[in-house]
Image (cartoon, rainbow, N blue to C red):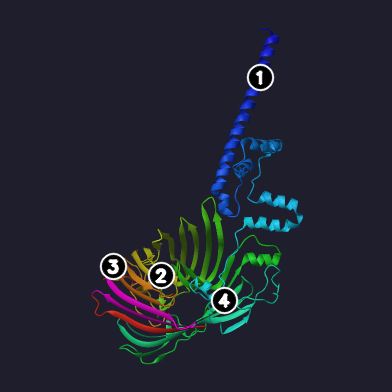
Amino acid sequence: MNTNDRLRFRGRTTTATIALVAGSYLVMSGTMAVTAAAQGSGDAAKGGWLTQLWPGASRVAPAETQADAAQPSGSSVHEKTAAGNTAAASKRKAAGKEALFGSAPQYVGASSIHEKNAADPATSAAAKTAGKDDLFRPGPQYDKNYDAKSQVDIYGAKTAVDPPRPPIEIGRAQYTSGAYDESSTLLGQLNPLLPGLAVYGDWRTAVAYNSNNGKDIAQIATRLNIDVDFKFTGTERIHAFFAPIQRGNAFTRYEFGGGDGNGKFNEEFDLNPQTLFFEGDLGSLYSGFSGKEASFDLPFTVGLFPLFLQNGIWANDAILGGAVSIPAKNSAKLGLPNFDTTFFAAFDNVDNKTILGSNNNINNNNNANIYGVTTFIDAFSGYIEAGYGLIQGRDDRDGLLTNFVTAAYTRRYANTLSNSTRVFANFGNGKDDEGFAILSENSLISGLPSTLIPYANFFVGAGNPQPLVDGNGAGILKNVGINFETDALTGYPKLNDTGSNAFGGAIGLQYLFNLDQQLLFEVATVQPFGDPIAGIGVATPQYAFGVRYQVPLSRAWLFRADATYQITEGADEDTFGIRAEVRRKF
């Protein structure tokens, strides 16, 4: 075979190969197209995802399938073929375009609407409306006798709550709506002034008979809490809190009975503010002064401000200093959808009765500094709280350094159990300033999850576990149950709440009726182990039974009654208390 023969052979081979590949491609394309058309037709007939999303729309089967389906049964095959030959060329052209560009989806009614519009332009507007109706669900159908009240009853017949308004309200009122006057822009166009002054609070009065710490006293006691709030903008304000008829934890009272009542009126007055602080957002202030929208939020506070962490267990005090928060952050790398971080420091009014001492039931709160950081994190299908704090002594506590760490995790399990597990630890170079405690707070989700709440809270502690700060001198167990808390008014008795070298807990049942009353029963115990720390822990087991009832008398008045009976093994007498209280909110 010479060179020319080889070239002709290769050319014929190449041509045949190209023809074979092209033919195979066309055959395969036709097969796939037929299969896809058949599948599309079947899906449309069954009602696919598009029909489910838009009930008025569905995919249309190919035109030839519709034509075959619509053909009368009496027509012959020859008639169908003759009718089909007339449109064959146009279909082949359309098929060629679809092969290049793909066919657009067709919806029921679409082609007929266009044909009607072309035939009768006067129906164009109606046709467009009909097309929209195919894509949207029909509007709601109401009964002829529409009853607005029955529609509200669907949501538990809830109505708007009309709370008592503050007795003094000047300027822009809080929690109101409507047309407001134009705001001043003294702090900038992007941080308009919304000035408003509000004075509000509550007044509590209780009558009680308590046998506590070997003393029997019947008394009537009262306290007045007054909040004064002056806001400048939506984020900046000055706030103050006053408790004028109490001094520390001693309240104005009349001791009228009991073996240890003094039979006289005991006035306690203190006009100094319990809190007084400025609160604002640096991002909003920057926006106002610069005229540019800030890309950050940085809330802060300075002054005598309340520090309340882990539901008040780790911190519940007003400290003199400042705090700044970095809020609402997230991290895709760490898988954290939301977390906040707060830094705080104080240089006076730091209350820790056990570590810093007290005189005549008044805490020594001006002999230490405090520094700390706390964070709140949404993670692991739950909620994490963590923090670190340092108390630095000065003056008569100079050289004292006590570290505090805490962590907590809260989560609901299998829609059956809600749990919060909390860990607290403290260590340093002071006297009796080392200890740790673990708390487990649990509530079962009953068949009445909003109103019937069984709960069981447990603890174990070693050494001398301490809250970071607490202005009431309460211990780390203050929230374990009602038998571990006093009433901050009459000296109502409580179990030992230090958690020092002890374990125990509280089991109770809370019923909220129709969310308008509260009835609670609880049993609790403290079981000591090891050697007790003198003046802190207990040497023998304690047991208690408690009950509480609360009911609102009106939007402003509340009635509450408590009773507890407590037994300490080896004690000369048991401890008990009974009290009734009315509270007026204003």
Q: Is residue 534 visible?
A: no
Name the secondary structure under disc 4: strand
Q: Hey, which residue is sitting farthest bottom in the picture?
A: 264
Q: Nearer the viewer, mark 3 or mark 2?
A: 3
Amino acid at circle 2 = Ile
Q: Could you tell whether 534 is left or right of 165 in the image?
A: left
Task: Look at mark 1 in the image and give the residue it sits on.
Answer: 14
Residue segment shown in magenta: 541-569
Q: Is residue 258 above or below residue 478?
A: below
Tell me how far mark 3 sits from mark 4, CA to CA.
43 Å
Task: Look at mark 2 in the image and give the residue it sits on.
Answer: 355
**Which quarter of the figure has residue 199?**
bottom right
Task: Look at mark 3 in the image and give the residue it sits on.
Answer: 528
Task: Look at mark 4 in the image and give the residue it sits on.
Answer: 239
Q: Could you tell whether 481 is left or right of 469 in the image?
A: left
Amino acid at circle 3 = Pro
